[in-house]
Image: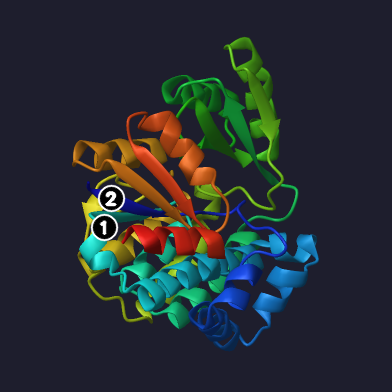
Amino acid sequence: MSRAFTFPGQGSQAVGMGRELAEAFASAREVFEEVNEALGQDLSKLMWEGPQEDLTLTENAQPAIMAVSLAVVRTLEREGGFSLADKAAFVAGHSLGEYSALAAAGSLTIADTARLLKRRGLAMQRAVPVGQGAMAALLGLEFEAAAEVAKEAAQGDVCTAANDNGGGQVVISGTKAAVERAIEIAKTKGAKRSMLLPVSAPFHCSLMKPAAEEMAEALSQVDLKTPAIPLVANVTASRVADPATIRELLVEQVTGMVRWRESVLYMEAQGVTSFVEVGAGKALTGMVKRIAKEAETLSIGTAADVEAFIKTL
């Protein structure tokens, strides 16, 4: 069985995330402490106690989601003698999850990853004044149809496909007026449902260019090693292992589309038969089930999940 390990993106955050792991495993506690120290912030307290609106802020949600994923990975390594390099054919992450995937594969340190994601969250928030941008989910339209809706709605503004999540779920991003137009157009094109998403900025579109420039500077200052397992990159939906190329793709990813459907299909074509989601929530597991219907799926996010997975090693 060939496995890919996947790492969730924004939207997977919830108050209480990671607390049970920290209580059950010293190795998980260490990761949360490393993240707190790197950020100079008691992020784990916010994760475990809330309030939800503060945890949902992009600058907090991004490092928090990464911290849970890496706490799971380190616990598997310490408690189960697990080695990602031996057990995985690929790693992949959805948007910020790409950073988690690289940290899990030894390309970035946890401390550097936490600082990069904090900066990424702040940069994305600053790129567009609140209220000027928006994102919406178009449900029931395949990618090509959704992309046409976005193109028709643009009318001189920015409106583009941001996440191709598969199974007729496409997220669009751009200026608020254009995204609202797209929602209305989608109704006439057969969408089952279209709705604005509760996000504070229009991610993965050209409006994020200032954030991409800031991340280019931030990434130039960190040591990025060759990952122990190839990464399937969001913007190319294919494998990459060269550190210089990974750096470029992480910058491109800020304004580029998350090609998740194509990434899963690529891994399946390379022989992957099992997809393991590592961290908070089960969003990617649901997406994979819609894209690669024959593949096995598993999510590991709780202490019980960790213990069950270790028994299979």
Residue 283 percent coordinates (x, y): 54, 44
Give the image's coloring scheme: rainbow
Q: Is residue 78 left or right of residue 302?
A: left
Disc 1: CA contacts within 10 A as few (<14), some (14-19) or many (>=20): many
Image disc number at residue 239 = none
Q: Please name the residue shown 32% across and 81% down the image.
A: 223
Q: Please name the residue shown 51% across and 75% down the image.
A: 114
Amino acid type at circle 1 is: Ala
Residue 175 percent coordinates (x, y): 64, 40
Residue picked out by circle 2: 3
Which residue is situated farthest in the front direction here? Answer: 311
SS for callout 2: strand
- Say if 301 sits above or below 244 in the image: above
SS for callout 1: loop
Amino acid type at circle 2 is: Arg
Disc 2: CA contacts within 10 A as few (<14), some (14-19) or many (>=20): many
Residue 296 percent coordinates (x, y): 36, 39
Q: Measure how far apart labels 2 and 1 are at the Cα level.
A: 5 Å
Q: Is residue 30 left or right of residue 291?
A: right
- Say if 309 sits above or below 144 in the image: below
Residue 166 percent coordinates (x, y): 44, 31
Of marks 2 and 1, which one's residue comes earlier in the chain?
Answer: 2
* Residue 158, quarter of the rendered image: top right
Does residue 164 appear anywhere in the picture?
no
Q: Please name the residue shown 46% across and 22% down the image.
A: 142
Count the marks: how many? 2
Q: Is residue 39 left or right of residue 239?
A: right
Image disc number at residue 88 = 1
Say whether marks 2 and 1 touch (CB < 8 Å): yes
Q: Quadrant of the C terminus?
A: bottom left
